[in-house]
Image (spheres, rainbow, N blue to C red):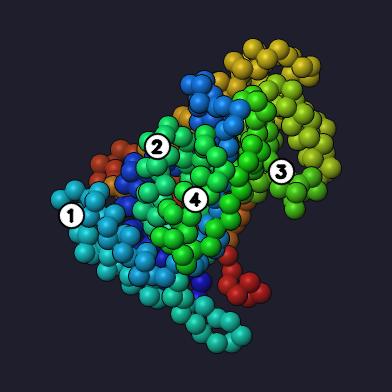
Amino acid sequence: MVCCLGPTIDISRYINRLLQPIYDQVARSTTFFKGSNAVHALENYAKQGRLQCNTLFATVHVNDLCTILPHELLMEALQRFLNDYVQDGKIQGVTIDTIIKLIRFVLQTQYFIFNNKIYRQIKGCGSGQPLNHLLANIYMLYWQEDLVKTLVNQNEIFGRCLDEMFLTWNKSKRELQSLLKTTIHENFPKLSITTSIGKKVNYLDAQISHINSQLRTTINHDQDIEPRGLPFISDHPPLMYSTLIKACLIRAALVCSKESDFHDERRDILVTFFKNGYSIEFIRNNVMEFFREFHISDWRSLFKQNIYDNMRQEIIEYDQQRLEKKMKQREKEQNEVIFYITSHLDGEELYNFQQDMKREWKDGVKNDPQFNNINIEVIHQSKYPPNTK
């Protein structure tokens, strides 16, 4: 049994819809969604005069976060979270006690097959489980409390994207190591973490460094994939190749603070797509469309830093609007009844089918008030086992 095909999957989806908007609101100030969020926080940090010659950057990775936490630890953190942030003990009429029982039931009925034997998973959640990241994030929200308090009191940066943390430090490396030891290692000895401390670090898809308090940020490429394969963009639909060039250029602008670094990245993007079989015409049209959307006419030549800064600011605002729209959609879904339609389609075929179904649904029921609170969602469902018909 795999999570996305299990009988409890709809319970998981429903509870995730109820809780995710609450977590988003609670954790917004300490959440990074991608590397560029850390870059923008650092740029503001530098403007405030906090970036000094001795400033250290640090990344902390929690190893195997989603598969190592015992269910009881996840449930303890969840109970605390619900008591702290759910008003009147209910969400959309569902009591805290019911939510706890439903999630415990989902966790206790996770099974998998290995070497022709059936096992029950007693730590973490299986791949494809909608509650997987939410429960891990709620646990981490309390796990990081002492560290965050110390950093905030010293006007330092802290942000976390699931199991990846980024922070700044204006004291000695030894003092930072001591802080991490007391707030993380000693309080949570069972969790294994990997840390990197210095004036140059990689955080998600951003490479961040400074020399004498002069900040430089570029794309951190996954050398196991690139330049042989197409890049992975965290908030871009997988296998949606028709808009991937635009997503790559947006990522480059969000991360690269210098115009010259952006153009180096642009050239690398063009070469990568060409080596992967895309025509010059397809690449050129996508690049032209990107620059036209953000009001740059002559994109083939290097343009001045101030022109790039204006374009970049426009892209940052565009990206922020997309995030706000995503958050509002989650809040809307908290109040909706959603019917899930499964399909073996994938990539652009799935995306186009999703859009067609949503348009048909909206056009068919938009004038009927009894359907105002009902929506549909088309999701990919893999064949399991993969060699079956």
Three-letter amino acid code at the position of disc 2? Val
Mark toward the start of the polypeptide (1 vs 2): 1
Asked if the residue at tag 3 contacts the one at tag 2, i.e. Cβ–Cβ closer than 8 Å, the answer is no
* Cα distance in 3D space between marks 4 and 1: 39 Å
Position of residue 190 in the picture relative to residue 364 (left or right): right
Please, which residue is most extreme toward the bottom here? Answer: 117
10 Å crowding of disc 3: few (<14), some (14-19), many (20+): some
Return the disc, 3 or 1, that comes first in the chain's sequence: 1
State which mark lies toward you, 3 or 4. 4
Between the residue at mark 1 and the residue at mark 2, the CA separation in whole angstroms equals 30 Å
Give percent across and percent down for residue 357.
48, 47
Image quadrant occupied by the C terminus: bottom right
Q: Earlier in the sequence, mark 3 or mark 4?
A: 4
- Mark 3 secondary-structure assignment: loop
Judging from the image, what secondary structure is the residue with disc 1 in? helix
The residue drawn where x is 52% and y is 34% is 170
Q: Is residue 189 above or below residue 286?
A: below
Q: How many marks?
A: 4
Tell me the tag on residue 178.
4
> Which numbered disc, 3 or 1, marks the residue closer to the eye?
3
Q: Secondary structure at mark 4?
A: helix
Identify residue for label 1.
89
> Identity of the amino acid at label 1?
Gly
Q: x and y percent of residue 169 in the render?
A: 52, 37
Q: Amino acid at mark 4?
A: Ser
Q: Secondary structure at mark 2?
A: helix
Q: Position of residue 124 (x, y in %)?
A: 45, 67
- Judging depth in this view, the residue of 253 and 10 nearest the camera is 253
Q: Residue at x 47, y 67 (%)?
A: 190
Between residue 343 and residue 117, name the one nearer to us: 117
Residue at the spot of label 3 = 221
